[in-house]
Image (tube, rainbow, N blue to C red):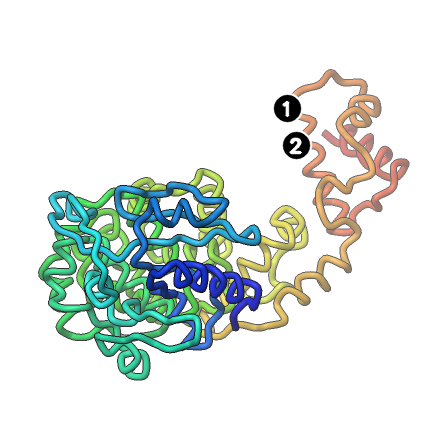
Amino acid sequence: MIDMKLMRTAKRILEKLESHGYEAYMVGGCVRDFLLKLPVQDIDICTSARPEQVMNMFERTVPTGLKHGTVTVVEAGIPFEVTTFRTEQGYSDYRRPDWVHFVDSLRQDLSRRDFTINAMAMDRFGRIYDYFDGQRDLKRKVIRTVGEPEDRFEEDALRMFRAVHFSGQLGFSVEPEVLNAIQNQRQLLEKVARERITQEFQKLMQAPFVEHGLRTLISSRIATDIPPFCYIQEGLNEASRYSMQGLTEPERWALLLCHVPGEHRMQFLRGLRLTKKFVKKVKRLLDILDSYESIVQAEQIPAYDLICLGEEDAVSLLKLNQLRFTQSLDINVEQQVKAVLKQLPIRHPQELCVNGKDLQTFLNRPPGPWIQKALNRLAKAVVEGKVANDPEQIRAYVMEDEHDE
């Protein structure tokens, strides 16, 4: 489950650091995912070499965070974050250390990390360095902090939300002592930049076991009184009951928010730092769900409504309503929508064989808002079989309609 080019390149970096007399290891999430046989997307490296020594050793480097000991080394076109062994002290903003101290001990470096499953290292021969029983916690499927959870969360309050995110990412349970600490210290999250919380929540909503993560979010009591999650408690309770594996990310957000009153939906969406494009997509899905609450089969969607919705949104509507009202998801829903659309004379209002200028010519009328209304009526008439999608037949239909009016 690991890109062999990525692994070979990482090993070359480790070997080069070692050849100059320094220790070097792969570290953190890449080791965790390697042991879990999950895809490894990137590899972080820790080393006893100081940042300036790393920069002198490799041709292509970027001083990503020299203050904290991090240099990005680019090898074979792949970026690797290489960070010097360090300890940290002072977290006046409950997020970042006030200062770091470089050390020569791998164990000291790993002891500053958040969770035991992220506090393991691996050398280039595949040997695992696990001082805090991370492998045992992987087998137990438990998220546990390195050291006292209260200390870890006071250092970096975002770690509380990271515990929730990892619960959804891995399907793991948060150790009771850690969960209790989150419940007691959750107010510290108000000191964290909203953008960082948004990032963690987005990762949760993309996660394979998102419903498990949402249940963890509920039990952590973060949603009880921490904005903007306090606005969507109803949605969390409802959405956590469904398996969301077959849903896209916007569909997951719509399922979460469709159980939330309208004003609270917007308070929540405005409270997070989301792109306008993403918010627009979620709001459209919510509007569709509000308009077609009881429809669970493609054949139930009126023909004109179906072509106005379009295939993508129609599929989303059916998937979400099937989950909400039947607690199951038909894997053939996309094919069903395609089949119904295929039977229609047009699949989109824009497929009409006449346009606004044609209507002006037929009726000898100036342009105006009437054109779009007339085109919509024509599209509805075509899909309902009242007139063929043929210029001459549409002309006759329009003239007769005008005469009747």
> Which label belongs to residue 62?
none
Say whether marks 2 and 1 touch (CB < 8 Å): yes
Which residue carries the number 2 mark?
373
Q: Which residue extends farthest top?
A: 366
Q: In percent of the image, x 27 and y 75: which residue is there? A: 130
Residue at figure coordinates x 13%, y 72% from the top left: 177
- Residue 276 % position (x, y): 45, 38
The relative height of residue 320 versus residue 64 in the rendered view (above or below) is below
In the image, what residue type sits under mark 1? Pro
The residue beneath circle 1 is: 369
**Where in the figure is residue 405, as x and y percent of width and height?**
72, 29
Q: Is residue 258 left or right of residue 245?
A: left
Q: Could you tell me which residue is drawn at 67 percent across and 67 percent down?
A: 336
Residue 341: where, in percent of width, then height? 72, 57
Q: Is residue 240 left or right of residue 354?
A: left
**Visible residue check, residue 44:** no
Q: Between marks 2 and 1, how big is the CA–CA gap? A: 7 Å
Q: Identify which residue, 355 or 52, lies in the foreground.
A: 52
Q: Secondary structure at mark 2?
A: helix
Estimate the x, y position of residue 32 in percent, counting from the top left. 37, 71
Question: Could you tell me which residue is drawn at 45 percent across and 69 percent down?
Answer: 325
Crowd band around label 2 with a 10 angstrom C-alpha radius: few (<14), some (14–19), many (20+): few
Three-letter amino acid code of the residue under disc 2: Lys
Pointer 1: residues within 10 angstroms few (<14), some, or many (20+)?
A: few
